[in-house]
Amino acid sequence: MSVADIISAKLNEAFAPTHLEVINESYMHNVPKGSETHFKVVIASDSFEGQRLIGRHRAVNAALAVELANGVHALSMFTYTPDEWQGMDAVPASPKCRG
């Protein structure tokens, strides 16, 4: 099972999202081909209702603590309630790697 699949499974279990995208952005960084070290997560869940951004990010970090301690070097998060996500046109773009 790929790291992206593990991240997806854990986030689905923890948040029952109405929208979830796990995007491996490792190819954008100076890592070996086929690496799974840099990810972007876009998630919309009722679980985030009434939470501030920092609380949402802490909850995602807690759900992925094992992965973050074992190989995932970077995790970009975009966390929304279903109503917030409904107004979005697309997944936010990632900046170019500086390293």
Image: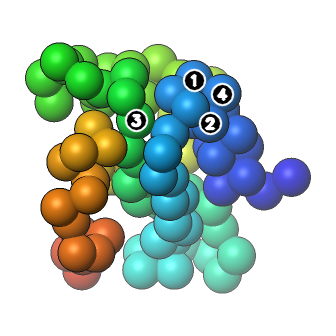
When the figure is inspected, residue 88 is found, relative to residue 11, above or below; the finding is below
Q: Is residue 28 left or right of residue 96?
A: right
**Dots 1 and 2: beta carbons under 8 Å?**
yes
Neighbour class for label 2 at 10 Å: few (<14), some, many (≥20)? some
Q: Considering only order in the chain, which callout, 3 or 2, is on the residue closer to the N terminus? A: 2
Per the model, the C-alpha gap separating discs 1 and 2 is 6 Å
Q: Secondary structure at mark 2?
A: helix
Disc marking residue 45: 3
Picture coordinates of residue 75 (x, y %)?
A: 40, 48
**Dots 2 and 4: beta carbons under 8 Å?**
yes
What's the residue type where badge 3 is placed? Ser
What's the residue type where badge 1 is placed? Ala
Q: Which residue in the protein does label 2 denote?
A: 12
Picture coordinates of residue 37 (x, y %)?
A: 55, 57
Per the model, the C-alpha gap separating discs 1 and 3 is 10 Å
Q: Is the image coloured rainbow, by chain, by secondary structure, or in one colour?
A: rainbow
Per the model, the C-alpha gap separating discs 3 and 4 is 11 Å
For the point 26% across and 54% down, the residue is 85
Residue 75 visible, this orientation: no
Q: Considering only order in the chain, which callout, 4 or 3, is on the residue closer to the N terminus? A: 4
Give 30 or 45, whichever is nearer the viewer: 45
Q: Is residue 30 left or right of residue 66?
A: left
Q: Which residue in the protein does label 1 denote?
A: 14
Q: Is residue 41 left or right of residue 6?
A: left
Q: Which residue in the protein does label 4 denote?
A: 13
What's the residue type where badge 4 is placed? Glu
